[in-house]
Image (cartoon, grey):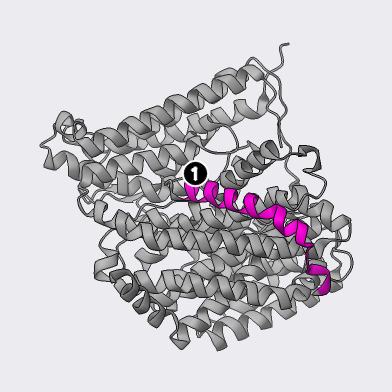
Amino acid sequence: MDLLSNLALGFDVAFSPANLLYCFLGVFLGTFIGVLPGIGALAAVSMLLPVTFYLEPTTALVMLGGVYYGAEYGGSIASILINLPGTPASAVTCLDGYPLSRAGRAGVALFMTTLASFVGSAIGIFILTMFAPLLVKVALAFGPAEYFAVMLLGLVAAAAITQGSAVKGIGMVTVGILIGTIGTDINTGVWRFTFDSPYLIDGVSLVALAMGLFGITEVIASINARTTSPTGDITLRSMLPRGEEVRRSIFPMLRGTGIGAFFGTLPGTGQTIASFVSYAVEKRVSAEPSRFGKGAVEGIAAPEAANNASALTAFVPTLSLGIPGSATMALMLGAMMIHGITPGPLVITNHPDVFWGVIASFWIGNVLLVLLNVPLIGIWVRLLRVPYQFLYPAIIVLICVGVYSVNSNIFDVVLALLMGVFGYGMRLLAFEPAPLLIGFVLGPMMEENLRRGLLLARGDYATLVLQPITGTILLLTAVLVVWSVCKTLRAGRRAVASEI
Amino acid sequence: MKSVDKRDLAAGAALIAIGLIFAVGSVQLRIGTARSMGAGFFPLIFSVVTVVIGLLVAVPALSRSGDLVVPPWRPFLSVIGSIALFSAVMETFGLVPAVAGTVCLAALADRRSTVLSALLLAAGLAVACWVLFVLALGLPMSVLRNPF
């Protein structure tokens, strides 16, 4: 079996002492940062990105992967205990998690989160293991035109399938693309929008952009936010759910996983939408929808499973096509490029140890997550009791030193600051920052592929578009655009959008 | 006077402004044609799209009402100020003064901070950064520097 020998190689890499250690560190630090209120997985990954520059590429990706799903899990802890979601995706967990917590059953809520996350992750990794190599086979036949089409689809999906206004989402994507054009044009070598500053020749630093947009913006927004402390201690005994509750959650978990896997694999869409959709579905299929919002365990199980399933299946397009499935994946792609690995279908043949090692480490990391978090839950509860006024200055310092350490260049800190001001302003105007990051990473790739494709087609758009794969994907993209415009128009007529 | 959605009006205006800035920059580069693109072609297309989207956001906002969200100035200014202070102090005076100054200024954001708690936190974090980044990770940065 080809797959088995590949997985064996992967586990061989993942079980090396260094990778095991950094996998553990990643999961631990990720959960730690994720628990902090207001700091999400994106901020966690961007804060720890500079730390991984000194590691081997595989180890770095293993650690960042651990940070990623660790932070997702940590966000759920904060949602349940103090009703302050660490990540947008875990905002749904607040709906039923916090009422359970108020009723003194926080332990059960945390246990169900752990269980549902694990089920979602396990099935997600399984899909990733099976599906990514298949997609690689397809992707090897891809030329620049096909890449351009898939990237366009990803960008439109990122913009259209958001919680807020689709038009604003598209606006953020195009702004991201424009910021991505800053720097040297790879085709002609001309400097674009650099203001003749030598610091901008290589373009805007991804770390500075991500830290500014997500780190600095989130810190400003969460200072002086209403804070509550978790009440009571959580014992292992109080975490055990009733048998009937577990039974009731099995199907919601599986349905959530399915929904999560669908949205995760689709390039450009992330976990937030997956968890919201799965919550809505559970509410609709439930025999007693009135229980939702008052502490229904299914209301935690389904979105948590969806969240984690989509977090892991988002690696499918990222690892096989080199196209980020979500904003966090855009950061992971950036990390790969910084480590000298060109993302795309060739990764699996050129760097099989990286590809399979990272996938195998997901298994280890998710088992670690369960093993770690049942005994460590007391630590996270205590962390949530630390007043925020002691935490946020530390986060700011970590951001500053982190950005500075990438190139030992103070200009990057100034850039992060400008991005923070910009991001905060956009947040006040109800823009979502995630599509911007996707546009920033995908934009330059899209331009390169479009221009290379045009060169190959001798400038003829007809031969470029009228190919079976390219044509189909472009048609899908057009359908998505029409759908999102219709959705926006309908929402406009309804005037008041009902918020969950 | 008719009421308008000030938030979306501002949002649209921001997009239009960004699009225009990049459009002005693009036309100074070689545009080329759609068949053989110059350096300015791709950014020009997307600056035009950004302006159009800005209009799509701003125009409907004229016929409904909404309020601009006023930012909480205190946390905003003190966080921004603290990072600006870091970038000003880091290269001239070194890591420890930069971290300490950043923490003190950042502490102003939260009304619950006291002078004592801010100073203790500043000292603690400065030492922690020195131990973590310089001693443990060995990052090349000056800890304490005399600029004169």
Q: Compared to A207, does A156 lie above or below?
A: above
Quarter of the image where one finds residue A459 = top left
The secondary structure that most of the magenta stretch takes on is helix
Q: Can residue A198 be seen here?
A: no
In what quadrant of the picture does the C terminus of chain A appear? top right
Horizontal and vertical percent position of residue A113: 69, 60
Q: Compared to A375, does A472 lie above or below?
A: above
Residue ranking furthest to the left: A458
Left or right position of B39 against A309: left
SS class, disc 1: helix
Badge 1: chain ID: A
Residue ranking furthest to the top: B1
Q: Residue at x 55, y 28 (%)?
A: B12
Quarter of the image where one finds residue A249 = bottom right
Amino acid of disc 1? Pro
Residue under numbered circle 1: A435
Relative depth, front residue between A82 and A48:
A82
- Within 10 Å of disc 1 (Cα), the crowding (few <14, some 14-19, many 20+) is many
Magenta region, residue range: A237-264
Relative depth, front residue between A91 and A208:
A91
Relative depth, front residue between B48 and A147:
A147
Q: Residue at x 12, y 42 (%)?
A: A456
Q: Compared to A479, does A353 lie above or below?
A: below
Q: Would you say residue A360 sits in the magenta stretch?
A: no
Horizontal and vertical percent position of residue A377: 75, 73
